[in-house]
Amino acid sequence: MREWLNETFIKEAFSDEELKRIPFVTVNPDKNPDFDTDPGNATKDRVFLLSITEANEYFSSDYSRNCKATDYAISKGAIMATADNNLLGTGWWLRTPGATRLAATRVTAGGEMPAENSVRAGISRISKPCLGVRPAIWVDLEF
C-alpha cells in the first residue's frame, strides 16, 4: 500500500506543481489499543493512511468519517454499502494493525470507528478487496 500511494497514486493524482507542496513527513506507527501486534517502524512518506488515533482526531463523528467511493475506486473493487435503501458509503483502510500482521483496522461503511469492546468488528484481512483507500497528505502552504 505504501509503495502504491507514494509511487503510483501520487504521480497520477497530483500535478508537478502540486507535488512541490507535498512534503515528506515522519509517519509514526500506531499501536492498536486492543492487540499487541507490532505496528512496525516510523516511515518517511508523502502519502499515507491515517491511524486510529488520527482518524478520531481529524473526524469528530461517524458522519464526518463516512466516505463515498469514487467511480475509480468502485472500478477497482470498492463496494458502496446500503442500509434501508440508503447509500452509506464505503469502508476504508487505516494503517493501525489488527489482531495479526495479516489484518488492519478500518473505518466501516457507515463511518464507525473500532471501539475498545468491539474492535474485532473494525478489523479486516488486508487481502479484502472491497475496502476503499482514503489517502492523507500534509500540504506546505508556504512553498
Image (cartoon, rainbow, N blue to C red):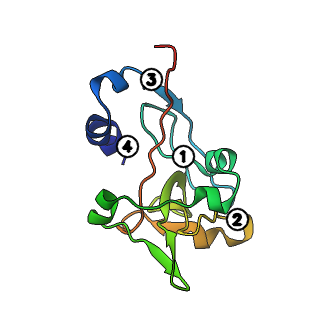
Q: Nearer the viewer, residue 112 or 83?
A: 83
Q: Which residue is mark 1?
A: 50
The reply to whether discs 1 and 2 touch (Cβ–Cβ < 8 Å) is: no
The reply to whether discs 2 and 4 touch (Cβ–Cβ < 8 Å) is: no
Q: Quadrant of residue 135?
A: top left
CA neighbours of label 2 inside 10 A, class few (<14), some (14 to 19), many (20+): few
Q: Earlier in the sequence, mark 4 or mark 1?
A: 4
Amino acid at the residue labelled 4: Arg
Q: Quadrant of residue 131?
A: bottom left
CA neighbours of label 3 inside 10 A, class few (<14), some (14 to 19), many (20+): some
Residue that lies at the very extreme toward the right in this rendered image: 117
Q: Which residue is mark 4?
A: 2
Q: How many marks?
A: 4
Q: Which residue is mark 3?
A: 23
Tell us which disc is closer to us: 3 or 2.
3
Image location of residue 25, percent across then percent down: 49, 27
Q: Which residue is mark 2?
A: 115
- Give the residue displayed 37% in from the left and 43% down from the top: 2
- Give the residue displayed 26% in from the left and 39% down from the top: 12
Q: Nearer the viewer, residue 85 or 114?
A: 85
Q: Marks 2 and 4, Cα distance to the nearest angstrom?
A: 25 Å
Image location of residue 136, percent across then percent down: 48, 41
